[in-house]
Amino acid sequence: MFMAVESTLPTPVRTPASDKDAKVLQFIEEMTKNVDSVQERVLREILGRNAETEYLERFSLNGATDRETFKSRIPVVTYEDIQPEIQRIANGDKSPIFSVHPISEFLTSSGTSAGERKLMPTIHEELDRRQLLYSLLMPVMNLYVPGLDKGKGLYFLFVKAETKTPGGLLARPVLTSYYNSDHFKTRPYDPFNVYTSPNEAILCVDSFQSMYAQMLCGLIMRDEVLRVGAVFASGLLRAIHFLQNNWKQLAHDIATGTLNPKITDAPVRECMRKILKPNPELAQLVTMECYEENWECIIKRIWPRTKYLDVIVTGAMAQYIPTLEYYSGGLPMACTMYASSECYFGLNLNPMCKPSEVTYTIMPNMAYFEFLPHGSSTSCLVDLADVEVGKEYELILTTYAGLCRYRVGDILRVTGFHNAAPQFRFIRRKNVLLSIESDKTDEAELQNAIENASLLLKEFNTSVVEYTSYADTKQIPGHYVIYWELLVKDSAIAPTDDVLNRCCLQMEESLNSVYRQSRVADNSIGPLEIRVVENGTFEELMDYAISRGASINQYKVPRCVSFTPIMELLNSRVVSKHFSPDLPHWTPERRR
Ligand code: AMP
């Protein structure tokens, strides 16, 4: 269905667009030239200010701020190692556990622990650091794409539900925190960074109303749009899918100048009242473009001045590149930054490169970074300035907010250097089997979900003998597909279609809260599907792997598949397909 379209990459202009840009670019040069000394300073600052925290005192750092003492005394940890302390903070302990600065809120990461989002304590000043990284992006982009001050960016940006921990601290995703901050809400006017979406639409928690208003504004301002984006590729595709489902109503609103009554959020209604005026000509154009069966190039057709898409298509998002190429007619895709709830890491200094060539330069002022050579023991960590080209590393962080030698779980490969700063290709996230958007399902979670679902088969004297999985992103929204080989001991009471549908739902109930939130609140993951395959299919799969050189002794059933011949084999053996008949449970409140 999808054609690979050659990107037309603009030639870099390479002169700063303004004095302000020149200063920012100079800052990047300084940071990347002095990586090691900046890192030394950052560690000194972090350890100096947090010397009296419970955590550093526990390891007898005794006020030392040098690398050797730090490395010899502080252990490398995972989230689970520090969870008891995190829980104390969540329960209201205000003593300086990780940081002498008060914990301002928790950022809920899309990585989960025991089925719930990880809670990352943060401090107020981290907002400045995040803002600083954002401020580097446009000056770099302006080197490659001239004239971005002559129009606007259509960005689909969303906030998610917030909760409070038992101790009263807010817990919300990092972007929800950022969009709600004054840093974002009262940002000074910058002609290079004007969005079509009003703050009211971005800050509306109802995902339908927020998307509707943002799309409506994007359509109304179509002549001004120079770039189209979302944080991740999956978000932009969701927006296109939304347009497919709602263009008639949107065109109606534009034709009549009246707002869809389903938009009930008062601030959104109020701001749309000022923006929405009857424009039958535009409504007709939208209708003409969307009415067509063929949606190829739809982005270029509706927003003809678009110069590039601003979306992350690295890591788990790479699966969406062909679909985005199809809808955009081969527009360049800029992956501008690499960030997480724990810390914003760095940016892409060549943002118009091909997705397969994207590298991120970690900014040494953001945190103290160490690198664990992939597969080595935690005693072999190397510093940011000392990583070697071609090698893969796991990223380890020490942050101003108080995380110390914390394993993020990302695997990066060094591809080269900008000045003294290494540039990294994002390879993968550790232990992620399935991902459609921000959900990250690991092998243990999938296994647990299968076990829970197969309990429903017991009364039918049936068990799951083998399984594997696949993240199907051919349609929007994507969905999980689970292949099951069943052992039906008594065919007279084989499980019915209804039972197998309920198994799908039971699996969904067992998956982590990020998955369930995407299903329920965001509608960004479709119903889970079970495909029952013929008996003997998994043995054939093994024969196939062995024919390609796998060892019989060491063969393990892959718990996730994507390789085309294996998919073809599995799909040719499917005897029945079943879908989750309902939404799983999800509320913003944490289960634990
Ligand atoms: P979260 O803490 O939920 O914001 O998720 C952060 C994680 O998303 C990172 O640790 C990465 O695994 C992934 N991520 C963030 N930015 C990128 C990027 N530019 N390319 C690939 N993966 C990314």
Image (spheres, rainbow, N blue to C red):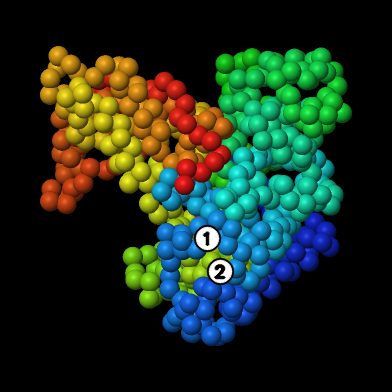
Residue 434 lies left or right of residue 119; in this view the side is left
Question: Dividing the picture into quarters, in which one does residue 16 lie?
Answer: bottom right
Disc ID at residue 572: none
Residue 351 at what x, y percent from top left?
Answer: 62, 52
Q: What residue is at 66 percent from the left and 68 percent from the top?
A: 101
**Is residue 152 among the parts visible in the rendering?**
yes
Residue bearing mark 1: 88
Other residues around mark 1 within 10 Å, as few (<14) / some (14–19) / many (≥20): some
Residue bearing mark 2: 97
Q: What residue is at 84 percent from the left and 26 percent from the top?
A: 273
Q: Tell me the element at label 1.
A: helix
Could you tell me the amino acid type at mark 2? Ile
Residue 526 lies left or right of residue 361; in this view the side is left
**Could you tell which of marks 1 and 2 lies nearer the N-terminus?**
1
Q: Nearer the viewer, residue 25 or 582?
A: 582
Q: What residue is at 27 percent from the left and 27 percent from the top?
A: 456
Residue 201 at what x, y percent from top left?
Answer: 74, 34
Name above or below for residue 146 compared with residue 99.
Answer: above
Q: Nearer the viewer, residue 207 or 119?
A: 119
Name above or below for residue 70 compared with residue 551.
Answer: below
Name above or below for residue 294 compared with residue 453.
Answer: above
Mark 1 touching mark 2, by CB under 8 A?
yes
